[in-house]
Image (cartoon, helix red, strand yellow):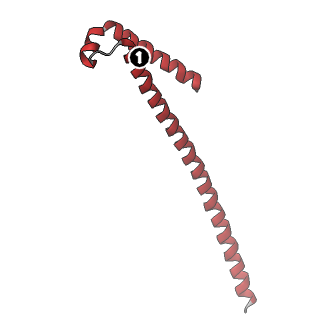
Amino acid sequence: MEVYRSSQKQKLLCNAVMQTDGNASSIQANEGNETESDTVSNLEGEIDKYERCCDAIIQINESLISLSRNLDRMIETTGELNQFTSNWLHLWSLSKK
């Protein structure tokens, strides 16, 4: 996963540099006096933010899956407990007659 992210990051940076080389004047007009290295640094920062968000979403998803499994087990266990209690009450009521 980390290698994939690293290669994706390199591709994004290469694309940004190529666009910067071709559009240096328009970038400077849009960004003020921002240099190419500033643009690359900003892009790296944005990519890092997206990667952290992606990691957080993955962790949340894994936590929700784990929670779902635990809830399924709790539902199953509750059903077993209800069945046991029902059987016990039935036997208890028969013993009182």
Q: Residues within 10 Å of mark 1 (few under 14, many from 20)?
A: some
Instruction: List x then y, in percent, for residue 5.
Output: 53, 24
Image quarter (top left, top right, bottom left or bottom right) of the N terminus: top right
Q: Residue at x 57, y 43 (%)?
A: 62
Q: Residue at x 47, y 35 (%)?
A: 53
Q: Is residue 71 left or right of residue 21?
A: right
Say what secondary structure mark 1 lies in.
helix
Q: Residue at x 67, y 66 (%)?
A: 80
- Residue found at the very far top of the displayed protein: 22
Examine the image and state in which quarter residue 33 appears.
top left
Q: Residue at x 43, y 25 (%)?
A: 45
Image quarter (top left, top right, bottom left or bottom right) of the C terminus: bottom right
Instruction: List x then y, in percent, for residue 81.
Output: 67, 69
| Foreground of the two, 64 or 37 | 37
Q: Which residue is mark 1?
A: 40
- Residue found at the very far right of the displayed protein: 95
Q: Is residue 79 left or right of residue 9?
A: right
Position of residue 82 relative to residue 51, above or below, is below
